Structure formats: structure tokens, C-alpha cells
Image: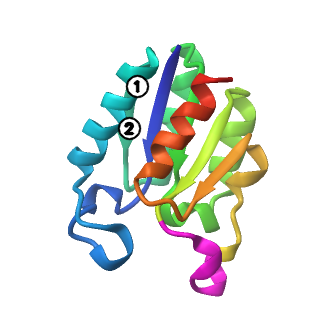
């Protein structure tokens, strides 16, 4: 099984950006954590991060051509604004799990809306970086 982990804007700044919300682990630390879990689950995992909406859409579309079996996606701020990401996930019909480190529903009102959620099989929110591992397990266990 091949799983693509996609991270949107500002997630490359983990460990620096608002550590009181997102923690002190860096993006590289997150990648290592996910790789260890993937190895334990016996799945292949690849990563993509961009601060640009179109690049995220391209990565989702490329996942179709690469025959990826599942997508873990944290769209960052695009969660609340991007119909393009929603449409891309719908277009490829690859099972996707939406992940948020914090719980957007307990934050500012504008963060309560998730466009991409309608195309995902599950949402994991407010579980810190552990949420990525939970999403990986959801996809691996099918």
C-alpha cells in the first residue's frame, strides 16, 4: 500500500510557528514519526508540502497517475477556502483522511468550515501530531 501525506501552507514551519498550538516538533520530526509508523504498518509513505494551492492540486492529481492507495491531507488554511482542493480529491477518488493538529472547531469561527471534508472518508482533529499516525492507520486498515 502506498500512502501520500500532503501538507499545506505553513506546515513547513512546525516547531517555529505558534508552538503553543502546534508543538515544538519540526516538520522533519513529523516526517520521521510518520515514516516509523508506516514501517510498522508495512506501508510505503511519501510526502509533499507546499504553500501554494495549485501545487497541492497538482500533487493530488499526480497521486492518481502514481496509483497511490490513500492520501493523508492537512490542507492548513486552505481547509477553509479551497474548493479546488475539494474538487481535486473528488476527481481522483482516492480514499483521503483530513488531518488537523489543533481542533479547528475550538478556534476562530472562520476555521469551523472545512471544504475538503466532504471528499474525505474521515477527519482527525485536535490530536496533535499523533493525528497523522491515526490517519495512516485508518487508511492502512482500510
Q: Farthest front residue? A: 40
Q: Crowding near pointer 1: few (<14 within 10 Å), some, many (20+)?
A: many
Say which residue appears at 63% left-offset and 23% top-offset: 141
79 above or below 110? above
Residue 129: x %, y % from top left:
40, 54
Q: Is residue 105 magenta?
A: yes
Q: Which residue is at the far bottom?
A: 108
Q: How many marks?
A: 2
Q: Which residue is mark 1?
A: 38
Q: Which residue is mark 2?
A: 48
The circle drawn on residue 113 is: none
Instruction: Measuring from the top left, give residue 26's x and y in whole percent.
Output: 22, 55
Q: Is residue 81 above or below residue 67?
A: below
- Indicate the quadrant where residue 125 lies: bottom right
**Most foreground residue, 22 or 55:** 22
Q: How far, Cα to Cα, is label 2 from label 1?
A: 16 Å
- Residue stretch rendered in magenta on the structure: 102-111
Viewed as shown, does residue 66 lie left or right of 120? Answer: left
Q: In this view of the protein, can residue 82 be seen by the observer?
A: yes
Percent across and percent down for residue 119 are: 75, 44
Q: Is residue 98 left or right of residue 15?
A: right
Local secondary structure at mark 2: strand
Amino acid at each position: 500500500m502506498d500512502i501520500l501525506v500532503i501538507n499545506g501552507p505553513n506546515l513547513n514551519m512546525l516547531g517555529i510557528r505558534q508552538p503553543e498550538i502546534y508543538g515544538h516538533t519540526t516538520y522533519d520530526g513529523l516526517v520521521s514519526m510518520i515514516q516509523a509508523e508506516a514501517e510498522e504498518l508495512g506501508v510505503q509513505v511519501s510526502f509533499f508540502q507546499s504553500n501554494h494551492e495549485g501545487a497541492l492540486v497538482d500533487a493530488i492529481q499526480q497521486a492518481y497517475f502514481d496509483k497511490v492507495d490513500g492520501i493523508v491531507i492537512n490542507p492548513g488554511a486552505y481547509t477553509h477556502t479551497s474548493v479546488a482542493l475539494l474538487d481535486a480529491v473528488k476527481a481522483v477518488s482516492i480514499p483521503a483522511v483530513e488531518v488537523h493538529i489543533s481542533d479547528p472547531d475550538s478556534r476562530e469561527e472562520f476555521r469551523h468550515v472545512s471544504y475538503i471534508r466532504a471528499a474525505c472518508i474521515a477527519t482527525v482533529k485536535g490530536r496533535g501530531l499523533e493525528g497523522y499516525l491515526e490517519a495512516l492507520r485508518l487508511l492502512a486498515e482500510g
